[in-house]
Image (cartoon, rainbow, N blue to C red):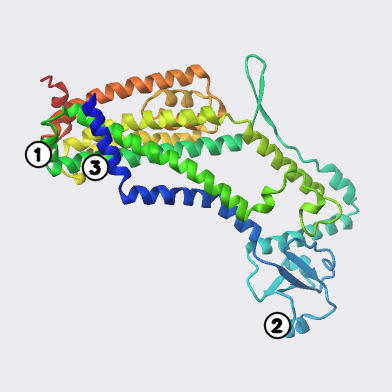
Amino acid sequence: MSKISIIIQREYLSRVKKKSFIVMTILGPILFSAMMIVPVWLATQDQGKHFIEVIDDSKLVDGFLKNGANVRYDYPPVSLEVAKRDFYNTAYTAILWVPENLLTTHKAVLFFKDHPGISVQEKIRTGIEDILYENQLEAQGIDLAKVDAAHIPVNIVTEKQSESGAEERTNTGVNMAIGFGGGILIYIFIFLYGIQVMRGVIEEKTNRIVEVIISSVKPFQLMMGKIVGIAMVGLTQFVLWVVLTMILAGIGQATFLKEFSDLKNPVLQQNAIPNMPNQINPQQNINYTEAAALFKDIQNINFFRILSAFVFYFLGGYLLYSAMFAAVGSAVDAESDTQQFMMPITIPLIISFIAAQFIMQNPEGPLAFWFSMIPFTSPIIMMVRMPFGVPLWEQALSMGILIASFIFMTWVAGKIYRTGILMYGKKITYKELWKWLRYSG
């Protein structure tokens, strides 16, 4: 055991001291926190302020377009020719010309100094459509107040009902995002660190370093030390990523999204938003209520159980696959020769990644259950299912099968490793690997 500990220490320290490890440990949290902060920050910046001059020859939209936080309309009594002539001598950023035959052409023209962006264009388009819609209803003698009253928004709230009668509120969208995100991370980590094991074995074998090493330790000890050492590297990097991402995201939120951090009440008060009208729009009130509900749904998620499962399935999946990667590395002389052996290893991972997209639609179906039990797919599939709630007996059974499979695969990989690690200059086939497995010497 002491020899394995020395190998683990060597593998761990030699990798965490590399510049690539340090750089990726720093860049990873920066990228993750940027993905969380930048989109929200950009949304707050919008596309700038736009002061639009409306020339309405149709007399349908004049005075009815609603001002927004970034768009303001003005309706001067001038013709299009005069407006275009004096355009660059005014504070207007764009001219919206509504032709007289709007109801037949269904087109309006926007002249601009600076491109207004697609969201502003969409806001103008929907504004005109709403006005025409109301005009058409009025023309047909339909009471707009009754139409608005007939439109009743409905929000579907999902609650999981247990056999004991307990109820637990859930959010399918949030569960899908967390589950699929966890599955992707495990998929990436298994490939990233499993390949490192294979490359490390090939490098030592090519440089003939392994001949010196196995004079002091057994091949199985060398393989286990390398696998566990790199696993600790991956776990260290993951923990640092989580901690640093949380710190950077907190700093970014406090710096760039301070106005959102200061809003304690999800149903915002009038003085919380500049230039807000005297009465909160009912639709805005609904949106804020939904945002508060979403925040509550996130709080209801059992993150401890999910993170614990993530660590277990990351380590279990990595140990299972890295044993196979180590066996492949010991059987070849160069990385270019690994392709024929890599396909059987990567196919289950690819299948589980594809299946995860369908399992999210039915996380408790038979496909989800069996893929959660098969050790080659369970690390990804179980992470996809965990946010939806997995019975403890299923999780325990899946974990037990994964542990047993890892032990068995380590034994299989060890038999290949101890023979292949000293095999040079011979093209290895599956038939040759089978002979190594049957060899009991």
* Badge number at residue 199: 3
Distance (Cα) linking label 3 and label 2: 64 Å
Q: Amino acid at mark 3?
A: Arg
**Quadrant into which the C terminus falls:** top left
Task: Find residue 168 and report its image quarter.
Answer: top right
Which quadrant of the rendered structure holds the N terminus?
Answer: top left
Q: Is residue 11 left or right of residue 155?
A: left
Callout 2 environment at 10 Å: few (<14), some (14 to 19), or many (20+)?
few
Residue 108 can be seen, yes or no: no
The quadrant in which residue 208 appears is: top left
CA neighbours of label 1 inside 10 A, class few (<14), some (14 to 19), many (20+): some
Q: Are marks 2 and 1 in contact (CB under 8 Å)?
A: no
Q: Nearer the viewer, residue 326 or 136?
A: 326
Q: Residue at x 36, y 38 (%)?
A: 234
Which residue lies under the disc numbered 2? 88
> Nearer the viewer's eye, disc 3 or disc 2?
3
Is 397 displayed left or right of 335 in the figure?
A: right
